[in-house]
């Protein structure tokens, strides 16, 4: 069916990152079957498709603040989970400009976050997302930790 609502809710699905991480702990367990794994991978494949094709997903991907950062974190995490390294790498490479260069001034300020009602909290949240993104990049040999703008 068609999902109505606003793109801002996609931020809340970042909690699924913990699901993906937790599933790794279950591999090899007698209580986690291959069918369970396949079913979850199929669900995340559909979710990645929805994130990249729905109106809400496309709008959230264009967000220039912590919403956009966590959209990228989710898309990379879930893409890696379903073995779509090509999509994950594409998002990671784009994040250099769309997230880091666009969101962080040379002096470290995040003007798009500071301008909001709770600038300090939003700045910390955005940094948290950028650090998660940088950690995910290590799994596909993309180094965001040492990325510098020109």
Image: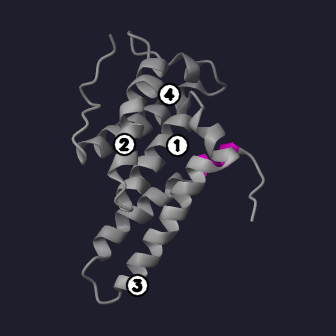
State the predominant SS element of the stretch in magenta.
helix
Of tags 4 and 1, the one toward the viewer is 1
Residue at the spot 37% in from the left edge and 37% down from the top edge = 92
SS at mark 3 in the image: helix
Quadrant for the C terminus in the image = top left
User: What span is in magenta?
Assistant: 7-12
Of tags 3 and 2, the one toward the viewer is 3
**Distance between mark 3 and mark 4 Cα atoms:** 41 Å
**Left or right of 137 on screen, residue 101:** right
**Against 33, is 137 above or below?**
above
**Against 30, is 64 above or below?**
above
The disc, 3 or 2, on the residue closer to the chain's N-terminal end is 3
Marks 3 and 2: CB-CB under 8 Å? Answer: no
Of tags 3 and 4, the one toward the viewer is 3
Give the total number of marks visible in the rendering.
4
Quadrant for the N terminus in the image = bottom right
The disc, 1 or 2, on the residue closer to the chain's N-terminal end is 1
Q: Mark 2: give few (<14), some (14-19) or many (20+) Cα within 10 Å.
A: some
**Left or right of 10 on screen, residue 89:** left
Q: Which residue is mark 2?
A: 132
**Distance between mark 1 and mark 3 Cα atoms:** 28 Å
Q: Which residue is mark 4?
A: 123
> Which circle marks residue 35 in the picture?
3
**Distance between mark 4 and mark 1 Cα atoms:** 16 Å
Find residue 125 and report its horizontal and vertical position in percent. 49, 36
Find residue 72 and report its horizontal and vertical position in percent. 47, 41
**Distance between mark 2 and mark 4 Cα atoms:** 14 Å
**Distance between mark 1 and mark 2 Cα atoms:** 12 Å
The front one of 72 and 123 is 72
**Left or right of 30 on screen, residue 97:** right
Find residue 148 and report its horizontal and vertical position in percent. 29, 18
């Amino acid at each position: 069916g068609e999902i109505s609502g606003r793109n801002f809710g996609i931020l809340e699905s970042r909690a699924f990152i913990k699901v993906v991480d937790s599933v790794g702990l279950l591999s090899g367990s007698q209580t986690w079957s291959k069918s369970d794994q396949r079913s979850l991978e199929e669900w995340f494949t559909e979710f990645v498709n929805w994130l990249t094709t729905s109106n809400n997903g496309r709008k959230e991907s264009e967000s220039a603040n912590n919403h956009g950062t966590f959209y990228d974190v989710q898309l990379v995490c879930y893409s890696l989970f379903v073995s779509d390294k090509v999509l994950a790498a594409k998002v990671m490479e784009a994040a250099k400009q769309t997230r880091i260069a666009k969101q962080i001034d040379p002096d470290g300020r995040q003007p798009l976050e500071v301008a909001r009602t709770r600038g300090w909290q939003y700045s910390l949240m955005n940094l948290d997302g950028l650090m998660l993104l940088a950690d995910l990049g290590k799994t596909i040999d993309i180094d965001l930790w040492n990325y510098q703008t020109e």
